[in-house]
Amino acid sequence: MAFPSRVRIVEVGPRDGLQNEAAQVPTGIRLELIDRLGEAGLRTIEAGSFVSPRWVPQMTDTADLVRRLKRRPGVAYPVLVPNEKGLDAALAAGADEIAVFAAASQAFSRKNINCSVEESLARFAPVLERALANGIRVRGYVSCVLGCPYQGDVAVADVVRVAGELTAMGCYEISLGDTIGVGTPLAARRLVDAVSASIPLQHVAVHFHDTYGQALANIFACLERGVSVVDSSIGGLGGCPYAKGATGNVATEDVVYMLQGMGVETGVSLDRLIETSLFIARALGRAPRSHLAMARTAG
């Protein structure tokens, strides 16, 4: 087994996590969360998204948040941008990295953003062209890579095609998202094999939800194939609002604990992560969700 010697964790809690929480977290709490994550050693932290407040009210304050960020040297704070209007807002706020999302599932794309996969990719073309012209790095996400809440199975070829098109447009990295958490390790490994035959493996990241408790096993299977970028969410925040029963992203602290046990470097302090997980759990008024935080705080 050839595991990577170092893994970069992409922290998605402040955006993908909190946007799927029922309560809107105050800007000050979100800023402190992001700062604590940076202090813990994370070097890519999703800060927010410039989507319509009508659809995602939890992210309404993203422009204010981006302007007020206490930026740490060497840390990227990408924001989700769905269209050119969102790009305009991101540029005005001073964002230096953005992310775009496309689905591998036609049914999910139509239900979620009311257009086909092909139409969504066409919408992103001018966004990437303008972003890159302005020196803005762009990360690409492909959702529903291992299953869709509306159509069920998703063809691997469809994932490969979308990942390839986003790469060709100029995305520096493609995150493969198991949006509803139905994937299992062998399916995840086969998917990585197929995608990495089309785009360089070093440009592939994985993003697993833990609905059926398979996220860590799926990550392990992808690490075996050489994947070295993993998305995760502090405290397991989030979920998928379009998928019944879809729980949150895999918890960052659980991922880092597993990687440390494997001797894989992350540059992240586990103790600081646990403190941060407890901080956001208190802010949300609930007990911590991650396995590690629960184990460390058990009476």
Image (spheres, rainbow, N blue to C red):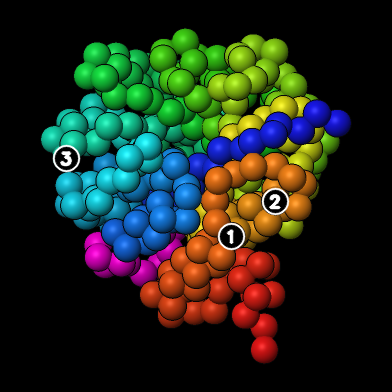
Name the residue that disc number 3 marks.
93
**Residue 136 shown left or right of residue 217 in the figure:** left
Farthest right residue in view: 1
Residue 28 covered by magenta stretch: yes
Q: Quadrant of the C terminus?
A: bottom right
From the viewer's perspective, is residue 199 above or below residue 35?
A: above
From the viewer's perspective, is residue 106 above or below residue 267?
A: above
Considering depth in this image, is 208 or 256 the residue closer to the camera? 256
- In this rendering, does residue 248 appear at all? no
Under mark 1, the amino acid is Leu
Name the residue that disc number 1 marks.
270
Label 3 to label 2: alpha-carbon separation: 37 Å
From the viewer's perspective, is residue 12 above or below residue 176?
A: below
- For the residue carrying disc 1, how many other residues have a C-alpha within 10 Å: few (<14), some (14-19), or many (20+)? many
Name the residue that disc number 2 marks.
260
Q: Which residues are magenta?
A: 18-30
- Chain-order first, disc 2 or disc 1: 2
Res 86 quadrant in image: top left
Considering depth in this image, is 245 or 43 the residue closer to the camera? 43
Marker count (numbered): 3
- In this rendering, does residue 95 appear at all? yes
Rendering coords of residue 178 (x, y %): 62, 41
Regarding mark 2 in the picture, which secondary structure is present there?
Answer: helix
Q: Residue placed at 23% from the left, 27% from the top? A: 84
